Amino acid sequence: MASLLRRRRRPSPGTSAALLAYPLLGMGALHFAVPAPFDSIVPPWIPGEARFWTYASGVAELAVGTAVAVPRTRRLGATAAVGLFLAVFPANVQMAWDWRRRSWPWLAVALGRLPLQVPMVAHALRVRADSD
């Protein structure tokens, strides 16, 4: 019972940074390995080819993930992660719009991505603060 009453500890700064860096690195690699799903959510109002933006965002995710993973550049990387999460938000909105007529599980996935940006930004800000 006492263990239930203990406060949860925040992960160590290194663990917290890894929880930010590795998903960014993984998603960045996916932009190159399987680009078509990413192409499909590039909003049509963004100029240029969707594939360019898929690759550009993949490069950004790889760069930001690498910066977060390296202690010396972690603060800068976490700050860049906040900007990246905000920059890709229109793609998440586009996905929700495009999937609005899909069955409810798919719609739930698309809509669920939208509020997830808030904890992702908060986590990046926490990593940034812990990098001082």
Image (cartoon, helix red, strand yellow):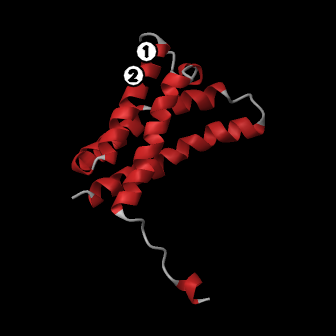
Q: Quadrant of residue 85?
A: top left
Question: On screen, 54 above or below 9?
Answer: above
Residue occupying image coordinates x 62% and y 28%: 97
Of the pair 45 and 27, the residue shown nearer to us: 27
Question: Which three-letter amino acid code belongs to the residue tagged 1?
Answer: Phe
Query: Residue 98: x and y, percent?
Result: 64, 25
Q: Quadrant of residue 127?
A: bottom left
Q: Secondary structure at mark 2?
A: helix
Query: Residue 57: x and y, percent?
Result: 41, 26
Quadrant of the rendering where the N terminus is positioned: bottom right
Q: Secondary structure at mark 1?
A: helix
The reply to whether residue 90 is in sight is: no
Residue position marked by numbered label 1 in the rendering: 52
CA distance for labels 1 and 2: 6 Å
Figure disc tally: 2
Image mark for residue 56: 2
Disc 2 crowd, CA 10 A, few/some/many (<14, 14-19, 20+) = some
Residue occupying image coordinates x 56% and y 27%: 94
Query: Residue 120: x and y, percent?
Result: 45, 48
Question: On screen, 107 above or below 35?
Answer: below
